[in-house]
Image (tube, grey):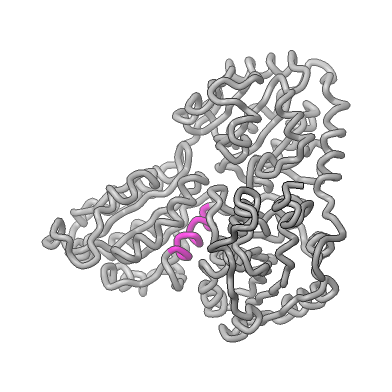
């Protein structure tokens, strides 16, 4: 006989869980007590949204479900931001929520929420466990649901009395991974389409990739001379300095790349959904009927034909697809072989940062410095805002599992993601980018980095405004500024107050020595860049946007 709390921990251990992210609550004290005697590492966070985003980063970088525990009511609703990210980004996460006791349910008891209704549209599966003896069944099923097909978040509600009750339950067994593989007929059909194509293009996206699959994709691209683009915030799926790489298919796309995709006669979409952002509001690939022939490869049959009608639909995970197709070769030298290097050259030109701009701090030289300083396995994280353009456009990713950023455009992600990434890979450099508004949404997780001695470096690009919103505001309602100005703390002093290292950059030349001091400190660090708000994009000033020039 074991308590429900003990059965939860047993089921997590059986499914290979090695760490969890949590904010403690009295509603699941029985689980915390069971964790005391477990080998599972417990990372205590400062706010449930940050904890859920750490779990998302865990799932994003490892492919295994990130596990998060929060308490009922405010704890659960705070965590919903991370669950929404995981859903839109197809990341495996399991959120456990302490729930009110069974006898109080339905009475609007203290902090009571109906989680099936609340999370119904932003989670892949939501369930409440009423019988402790069924915990092994439900937890193992949660791992299967979170990782199969299109991965996503699962939410499990745990009534407090169920966790303290004693039950006899079967021993928990690990979930069985489900792989979807392409058939030979589908591979033959794809080979025929490629041999007939004149202007093919490949777009990589989604999850369920690993380093081996990325390497096999590179082999396929080389064999077929295929130009390859990566979907929005999936840049780690292809080496940016490889001659077949054509650029990122996301916000602010290179116009030459956009033209190439629109003029393609065959598009291979592998792993991704090609939603609103990467499709440029469904203009690169028109929905529901693309101008190009479309081969859509996706692990979830429900995604095939949902937004686009494909010429050929292949229900397979990216890793299984590239493994099956890697041995196929073109019948002759592809007619497009000479065009692929031109697209790569256009990418190199597009991803070369400008040397000048308004103000005394220039982000272009800073990005150039980071490109020469950071090793290929450095992990870069960020949330959302105009500052992220500098990362996505000018950082040239080389390896898999080096990027954690929300395709859902959620602010506040970079700092908690960096904490999780450094905890997972302590030997690697982890750099978080954040705007001033973005950082202060989950900046309290810097305290978590200090508590666990995780020397992340957070680069806070401080321009004193909600930059993206101000940019749109100035364009649509010039001269009518409201609700977009910010008065910020001294971020370097804030870092020191937390027990970390802080630096302030007010001139371009200050950045390199400041960054090197932060790196050498061995502490979690904040490097604050005080950027002129005129420098709102790499190519246009705020004045130019306001004047529509």
Along the horizontal axis of the image, is 220 left or right of 149? Answer: right
Rendering quarter of residue 464: bottom right
Q: Position of residue 160 (x, y in %)?
A: 21, 65
Q: Can the viewer see residue 394?
A: no
Rendering quarter of residue 327: top right
Q: Nearer the viewer, residue 147 or 456?
A: 456
Q: Is residue 150 above or below residue 517?
A: above
Q: Can the viewer see residue 521?
A: yes
Q: Is residue 50 magenta?
A: yes
Q: Is residue 543 above or below residue 451?
A: above
Q: Is residue 209 above or below residue 18?
A: above
Along the horizontal axis of the image, is 293 left or right of 365? Answer: left
Q: Position of residue 171 (x, y in %)?
A: 29, 54
Q: Residue at x 72, y 72 (%)?
A: 530
Along the horizontal axis of the image, is 149 left or right of 474? Answer: left
Along the horizontal axis of the image, is 147 left or right of 401? Answer: left
Q: Residue at x 55, y 42 (%)?
A: 208
Query: What is the chief secondary structure element of the magenta stretch?
Result: helix
Q: Is residue 205 above or below residue 471?
A: above
Instruction: Give the farthest residue toward the left.
Output: 103
Q: Is residue 204 magenta?
A: no
- Number of numbered markers: 0
Q: Residue at x 69, y 66 (%)?
A: 429
Q: Residue at x 63, y 64 (%)?
A: 434
- Quarter of the N terminus within the rendering: bottom left
Q: Nearer the viewer, residue 481 or 456?
A: 481
Instruction: Give the farthest residue toward the front.
Output: 479
Rendering quarter of residue 340: top right
Q: Report the magenta residues as a range.
A: 49-59
Q: Position of residue 516 (x, y in %)?
A: 78, 76
Q: Nearer the viewer, residue 168 or 409?
A: 409
């Amino acid at each position: 006989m074991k308590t429900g709390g003990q059965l939860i921990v047993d089921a997590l251990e059986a499914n290979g869980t090695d760490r969890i992210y949590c904010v403690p609550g009295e509603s699941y004290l029985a689980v915390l007590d069971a964790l005391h005697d477990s080998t599972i590492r417990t990372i205590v966070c400062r706010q449930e949204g940050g904890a859920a985003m750490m779990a998302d980063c865990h799932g994003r970088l490892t492919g295994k479900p990130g596990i998060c525990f929060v308490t009922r009511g405010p704890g659960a609703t705070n965590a919903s931001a991370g669950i929404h990210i995981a859903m839109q980004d197809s990341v495996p996460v399991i959120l456990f929520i302490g729930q009110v006791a069974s006898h109080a349910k339905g009475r609007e008891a203290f902090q009571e929420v109906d989680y099936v209704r609340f999370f119904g549209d932003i989670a892949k599966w939501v369930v409440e466990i009423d019988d402790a003896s069924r915990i092994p069944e439900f937890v193992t099923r949660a791992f299967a649901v979170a990782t199969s097909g299109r991965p996503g978040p699962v939410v499990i509600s745990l009534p407090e009395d169920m966790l303290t009750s004693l039950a006899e339950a079967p021993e928990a067994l690990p979930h069985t991974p489900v792989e979807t593989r392409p058939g030979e007929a589908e591979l033959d059909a794809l080979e025929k389409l490629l041999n007939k194509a004149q202007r093919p293009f490949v777009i990589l996206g989604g999850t369920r990739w690993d380093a081996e699959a990325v390497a096999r994709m590179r082999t396929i691209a080389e064999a077929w001379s295929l130009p390859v683009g990566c979907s929005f915030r999936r840049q780690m799926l292809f080496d940016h300095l490889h001659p077949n790489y054509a650029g990122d298919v996301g916000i602010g796309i290179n116009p030459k790349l956009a033209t190439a995709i629109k003029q393609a006669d065959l598009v291979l979409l592998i792993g991704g959904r090609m939603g609103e952002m990467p499709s440029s509001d469904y203009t690169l690939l028109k929905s529901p009927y693309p101008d190009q022939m479309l081969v859509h490869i996706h692990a979830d049959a429900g995604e095939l034909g949902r937004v686009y009608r494909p010429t050929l639909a292949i229900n397979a995970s990216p890793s299984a697809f590239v493994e099956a197709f890697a041995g196929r070769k073109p019948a002759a030298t592809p007619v497009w072989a000479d065009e692929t290097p031109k697209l790569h050259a256009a990418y190199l030109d597009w991803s070369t940062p400008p040397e000048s701009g308004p103000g005394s701090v220039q982000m272009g030289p800073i990005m150039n410095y980071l490109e020469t300083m950071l090793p290929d396995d450095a992990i870069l994280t960020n949330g959302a805002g105009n500052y992220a353009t500098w990362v996505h456009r000018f950082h040239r990713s080389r390896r898999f599992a080096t990027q954690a950023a929300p395709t859902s455009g959620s602010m506040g992600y970079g700092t908690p993601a960096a904490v999780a990434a450094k905890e997972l890979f302590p030997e690697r450099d982890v750099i978080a980018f954040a705007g001033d508004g973005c950082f202060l949404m989950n900046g309290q997780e810097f305290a978590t980095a200090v508590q666990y001695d995780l020397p992340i470096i957070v680069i806070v690009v401080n321009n004193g405004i909600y930059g993206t919103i101000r940019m749109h505001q100035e364009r649509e309602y010039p001269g009518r500024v409201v609700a977009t100005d910010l008065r910020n703390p001294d971020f370097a002093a804030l870092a020191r107050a937390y027990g970390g290292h802080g630096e302030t950059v007010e001139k371009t030349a200050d950045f390199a020595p400041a960054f090197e001091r932060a790196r050498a400190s061995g502490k979690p660090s904040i490097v604050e860049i005080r950027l002129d708000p005129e420098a709102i994009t790499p190519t246009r000033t705020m004045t130019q946007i306001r004047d529509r020039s």
